[in-house]
Image: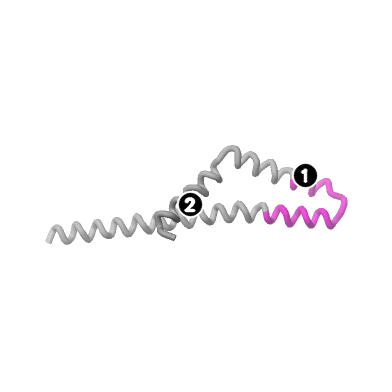
């Protein structure tokens, strides 16, 4: 994947994580899992809900990882560009 594509991918992940509807739905799902977990009388059901809660967190972590990866790529691209501009300026000043 090109650096630019990775940066665009990260921006899309950021848009999802910052989307009001996504955040609201995410919080509602999490609250419902916790509610069912608290009200569950069956240990097997509680274990299943606990696993579901763990998966719920992993999904968000995956989106955040994509976002961070793009941020790192963007910083690297900016450093490379600054370095190239410095080299051009140095050579032009010779």
- Percent position of residue 3, x then y: 40, 58
Q: Disc 2 vs disc 1: which is toward the camera?
A: 2
Q: Residue at x 15, y 58 (%)?
A: 92
Residue range corresponding to the magenta coloring: 33-55
Residue 35 falls in image quadrant:
top right
Q: Which residue has dot 1 on it?
A: 35
Residue 37 picture location, percent across and down = 79, 49
Main SS, magenta residues: helix
Q: Quadrant of residue 22?
A: top right
Which of disc 1 and disc 2 is earlier in sequence? 2
Query: Which quadrant of the figure contains the C terminus?
Result: bottom left
For the point 74% across and 43% down, the residue is: 32
Q: Residue at x 83, y 46 (%)?
A: 39
| Location of residue 34 in the rendering, given as x and y in whole percent from the top left corner | 75, 47
At x 18% / y 60%, what residue is drawn?
Answer: 90
Query: Which residue is under mark 2?
Result: 10
Q: Nearer the viewer, residue 36 or 10?
A: 10
Q: Residue furthest left?
A: 94
């Amino acid at each position: 994947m090109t650096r630019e594509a990775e940066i665009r991918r990260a921006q899309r992940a950021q848009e999802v994580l910052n989307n009001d509807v996504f955040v609201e739905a995410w919080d509602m799902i999490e609250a419902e899992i916790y509610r069912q977990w608290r009200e569950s009388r069956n240990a097997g059901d509680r274990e299943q809900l606990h696993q579901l809660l763990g998966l719920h967190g992993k999904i968000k972590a995956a989106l955040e990882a994509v976002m961070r990866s793009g941020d790192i790529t963007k910083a690297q691209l900016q450093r490379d560009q600054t370095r190239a501009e410095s080299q051009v300026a140095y050579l032009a000043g010779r």
